[in-house]
Amino acid sequence: MNRFRRCRMRPAGIGVAVGAVGLAVLASATPAAAARLGAADLGFSVGAASDYVFRGKSLTDENPQIYGGVNAAVGRAYAGVWVSNVDFGNGTDAEFDLYVGVTPQAGPVSFDLAIIYYGYAGQPKGSHQDYFEGKVAATVPLGAASLGAAVAYSPEYMGKRGKALYYEINAATTVPGTPFSISAAAGRQEFNGPFDYNTWNVGVGYALGGHLGFDVRYWDTDVGGDKLYGSRVTAGVKLTF
């Protein structure tokens, strides 16, 4: 599971199309179906990517990423944890996300409402890198495709930077008769202060069976002079079970 798509919107590396499909599946679950599976329907994921890109920025100093997560769903409610390596150049070596949310349905529109805690292991004392974020996302099916929008808000962003807002639009489609999918997103990250920026990505996914997926994605931002925000192509693989 990826981050903004990491639950979300969580996305990084291999995620927009997979995330859209996963949201649709989760939103279609009923309490009766969950009851048949016991107290909770558990899902697990592990994956790797050539870089961990979050909202257009490399969080692994342009090095490979390995991640994993577990998600529990009961009816339209879910909760989980997701862990990945990171490299901020200050000793921080791991990110762990804790999240809880619900996926209500209104006609054809699938919603995803969540609260996410981003924690970081190994961070320097007093760096205040941990933060909370609230997310609201919506997805509408359009035949073989889907169109979505999402907004994430943090009252106190990483490093005690104050309020922060991220919003994006995204789209995904399967290629009929093939295991391929195409997805794209465009977003804007705004802070309580300078350094607002725009980001976008587009990629191709390949589903092998029902549990293994591959993704090749182009990322970019309008930030100049910082290699971590520069254009790049990532390749990733994700196993869900």
Image (cartoon, helix red, strand yellow):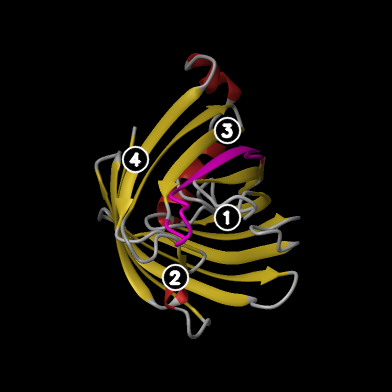
Q: Amino acid at mark 4?
A: Val
Residue at the spot of label 3: 79
Q: Residues within 10 Å of mark 3 (few under 14, many from 20)?
A: some
Q: Secondary structure at mark 1?
A: strand
Q: Is residue 28 visible?
A: no
Q: CA distance from mark 1 to mark 4?
A: 27 Å
In this rendering, the label closer to the viewer, 4 or 2: 4
Residue holding disc 4: 46
Residue depth check, mark 1 versus mark 4: number of the one nearer the observer: 4
Q: Which residue is mark 1?
A: 140
Residue denoted by label 2: 201
Badge 1: residue crowd in 10 Å (few <14, some 14–19, many ≥20): some
| Residue at 64% from the left image edge and 77% from the top image edge | 195
Residue at image coords 42%, 58%: 87
Under tag 2, what secondary structure?
A: strand
Q: Give the Cα separation between the discs numbered 1 and 2.
A: 20 Å
Asked if labels 2 and 1 touch by Cβ distance under 8 angstroms, the answer is no
3D distance between C-alphas at marks 2 and 3: 27 Å
* Mark positioned earlier in the residue sequence (3 or 4): 4
Q: Nearer the viewer, residue 19 or 134?
A: 134
Residue 59 in the image, given as x and y percentages of width and height: 45, 61
Q: Secondary structure at mark 4?
A: strand
Q: The disc labelled 3 sits on which kind of residue?
A: Ala
Q: Earlier in the sequence, mark 2 or mark 3?
A: 3
Going from N to C along the chain, the mark reached first, 4 or 2, is 4
Q: CA distance from mark 1 to mark 3?
A: 23 Å
Report the front residue among 126 and 190.
126
Relative image position of residue 86 (x, y in whole percent): 43, 54
Q: Is residue 193 left or right of residue 230?
A: right
The magenta segment: 87-104
Q: Is residue 92 magenta?
A: yes
Q: Quadrant of residue 51?
A: bottom left
